Amino acid sequence: MDHTFSISGDGIVITPMTAPESELYRQLRNRPEVRERLYSHNEIGKEAQEAWFSRYLSKPGDYMFTVRSDSGTFLGACALYDEKDGCAEFGRIIIDKKAAGRGGVGCIALSLVCKLAKKEMGLHKITLDLYEDNAASYKMCSGAGFITTDRKPSEKEPGRTIIYMEKEL
């Protein structure tokens, strides 16, 4: 969704994603070490990303954010989506650890998006889900105040478990 929400803090700046940033996000997302942690392991082509970004801009309730350092370095992206009844799902987060140069950037970004969601969007709850074996994401979400509400076997990947988490804002 085309939006104007932004927030900054702790050396991180969260702004609406632009088309050129969507391409940077695609390149980061296509790294093998990143794809293995995602629900969809497929590589995304440039044309497919452009089509996705175009659809995203017209989809109410979806908010893609770019994560940058306060010096302007592209660090990654994240999203709030499926917004309804004062609740949205958080996800699509990918942080370039090398560009970040420090740990905890994902947790800072998630915490900032939660603040923005409450203050600017009037949301009262954010939910998310992740693979149980994704320890870095679990640490990030727990550090941002999310609590586990359920665990279920993955239908897409037998042998893997999905953790469901939420945070009241």
Image (spheres, helix red, strand yellow):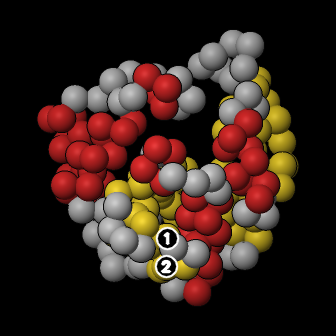
* Quadrant housing the C terminus: bottom right
Q: Is residue 64 left or right of residue 106?
A: left
Identify the residue at the far left of this view: 47
Q: Residues within 10 Å of mark 1 (few under 14, many from 20)?
A: many
Seen at 79% across and 64% down, the residue is 145
Q: Is residue 97 left or right of residue 143?
A: left
Residue 11 point in image, percent of width and height = 51, 73
Residue 54 point in image, percent of width and height = 20, 52
Answer with the quarter of the image where residue 119 lies: bottom right
Seen at 69% across and 23% down, the residue is 154
Give the mark count.
2
Residue 49 point in image, percent of width and height = 24, 40
Q: Residue 145: in sight, yes or no?
A: yes
Answer with the quarter of the image where residue 163 lies: top right
Seen at 55% across and 79% down, the residue is 9
Seen at 47% across and 80% down, the residue is 7
In-front residue for pair 102/130? 102
Amino acid at dot 1: Ile
* Quadrant housing the N terminus: bottom left
Q: Which residue is mark 2?
A: 8
Q: CA distance from mark 2 to mark 1?
A: 6 Å
Judging from the image, what secondary structure is the residue with disc 2 in? strand
Q: Is residue 47 left or right of residue 5?
A: left
Is residue 130 positioned above or below 12 on the image?
Answer: above
Amino acid at dot 2: Ser
Is residue 3 positioned above or below 96 on the image?
Answer: below
In-front residue for pair 166/140? 140
Q: Residues within 10 Å of mark 2 (few under 14, many from 20)?
A: some
> Which label sits on residue 12?
1
Asked if disc 2 and disc 1 are in contact, CB closer than 8 Å, the reply is yes
Judging from the image, what secondary structure is the residue with disc 1 in? strand
